[in-house]
Amino acid sequence: MNMADLFGKMQEMQENMKKVKESMDSITAEGSAGGGMVVATATGSKKIIKIKIDPEVIDKNDPEMLEDLICAAVNKAFEEAEIKAKAELNKVTQNILPNIPGFDLSKFGL
């Protein structure tokens, strides 16, 4: 691959990655804890958009349990959202990255 082709592919990939980053809010994933008693929904841009709590898990004498369940559900939602977001990014980068040794998406904030 010559330098002009490589530069063109890099520009194309940057444009595609910008579109993907903009679409991260439309990617959603759920995480649950306590056998589904707490369910959190996150976007691909790591924002929590919904938390559902089964009233049976609310115990005013044990708020720590509910706090732990919320944290676990949120963390699972973030993990799932990250998996979906990476899959979306892989669609954009799969054809170009093997041709660029040592290319690291983290340098782009991804």
Image (spheres, helix red, strand yellow):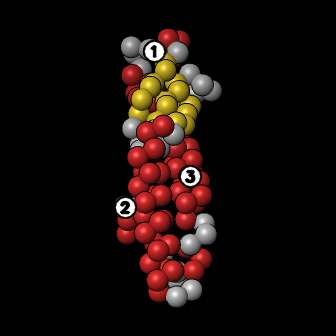
64 versus 82 height, above or below: above
What's the amino acid at mark 1? Answer: Ile
As rendered, which of 34 and 42 lies closer to the eye? 42
Horizontal side, residue 8 vs residue 35: left or right: left
How far is the residue under mark 1 from the one under mark 2? 38 Å
What's the amino acid at mark 2? Answer: Gly
Chain-order first, disc 3 or disc 1: 1
How far is the residue under mark 3 from the one under mark 1? 37 Å
Task: Please state the horizontal and vertical placement of residue 2, each as a whole percent of the image.
Answer: 52, 88
- Quadrant that contains the C terminus: bottom left
Residue 109's tag is: 2
**Mark 1 = which residue?**
58
Chain-order first, disc 3 or disc 2: 3
106 versus 33 height, above or below: below
Q: Residue at x 52, y 15 (%)?
A: 54
How far is the residue under mark 3 from the one under mark 2? 15 Å
- Classify residue 23 by image quadrant: top left
Task: Please state the horizontal and vertical placement of residue 91, each as a whole percent of the image.
Answer: 59, 58
**Mark 3 = which residue?**
88
Q: Residue at x 50, y 11 (%)?
A: 55
Q: Callout 3 environment at 10 Å: few (<14), some (14 to 19), or many (20+)?
A: some
SS at circle 2:
loop
Q: Is residue 25 visible?
A: yes
Q: Residue furthest top?
A: 55
SS at circle 1:
loop
